[in-house]
Amino acid sequence: MAMAEYGWGLSHELVKKARRELHEVPDRRPDLIDAVRSQIHTRPDINFLRTDDVFILRFLRARKFDVVEAFRLYGRYFEYRQENSNLFRKFQAAEPSIKEALFDGLPGVLPHYDHFGRKILVLYSANWDNTRYGLAAIYRAILLTLEKLIDDEETQINGFIIIVDWSQFTFKQSTWLNPKILKLMIEGLQDCFPARFGGIHFINQPWYIEAIFKMIKPFLKEKNRDKIFMHGINLTTLHQHIHKEVLPAELGGLEPPYNNQYWAKQLVGDENFSFGDKHIYWPNYGNFKTRSETFPLDHFSSETKPTTSSRGTHLDEEFFLID
């Protein structure tokens, strides 16, 4: 991707927001990207599958252009993939268990942004049928969704919010919430992914969900604990954070009821979008060349270069619990 192809399509308001909230200065971007990339050689234990300017930029934005913190996040992103390689095997929307989770709306993505320009993810917990796929599949579907959405520069700057609706989620279903997978999810989302999370909103949560949350709360960083909101049946407090104009009817909004297939069809239909353990999605940016000659693309083995992944096979929940 040519240097002029990113940052130039942003509105004047978004450029100002990036400068104000993220300390992003367009003229300094190239040098700061190179500063992050120049540290790759300090971590020979990590296989950095993407090193292009566009990819590194999202880590700088996620850490407010602090080069040290951005590189730490960049390293942890790939380190997490190596440490949990089973999560990223056959990691594409066509993989059966991921596909089923997506078509059940786990997660879904609303068509409209909130009033801060953030993408809104929704999860309707009662749709989960553990006989078809486990919690790991839902987590993989969430990660793949985030990977797709974070490709958009506006989302890198504005971030995400998540709504989890626990309506009709039974006590029996709550026993499927594997603690090991929950801990893995917290680690991956708060320490290893380049996104700005504006908040997670629970609605209609029963007492047993609040009890589970108390168990996992110690694993959350303090700043992230403050971003989790328990609304119960009071949708008025939810609407104080997310306006009714962009929410579907079942969340007390003014939009039509959400169609679970809306997001699933978009993601499942893109066969090239894969973030597997060996290959990672590399958009076709035409004449893109990295500014740095230190790490040209042919520096890496052919194994790490992008290819189109084949369709996956079902991966059982137990597969992810192997130490």
Image (cartoon, grey):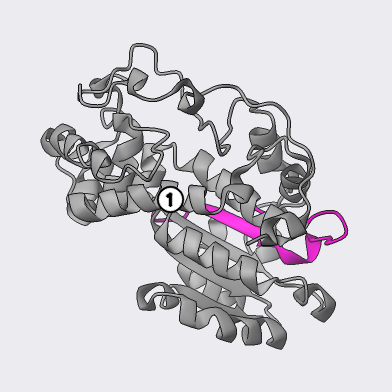
Residue 279 in percent (x, y) is at 53, 31
State the count of labels. 1
Residue in the picture at 62% in, 58% down: 122
Residue type for callout 1: Glu
Location of residue 36 in the rendering, given as x and y in whole percent from the top left corner: 22, 42
Say which quadrant the N terminus sits in.
Answer: top left
Relative to 255, is 134 on the left or the right?
Answer: right
Decide which of 18, 114 is in the foreground and name it. Answer: 18
Residue 308's place in the image compared with 103, above or below, is above
Q: Does 115 appear above or below 294? A: below
Is residue 27 shown to the viewer in this render? yes
What residue sits 64% from the left and 82% below the top?
Answer: 212
The residue tagged 1 is: 79
Q: Secondary structure at mark 1?
A: helix
Check the image and report above or below for 160 versus 53.
Answer: below
Judged left or right of residue 15, residue 118 is right
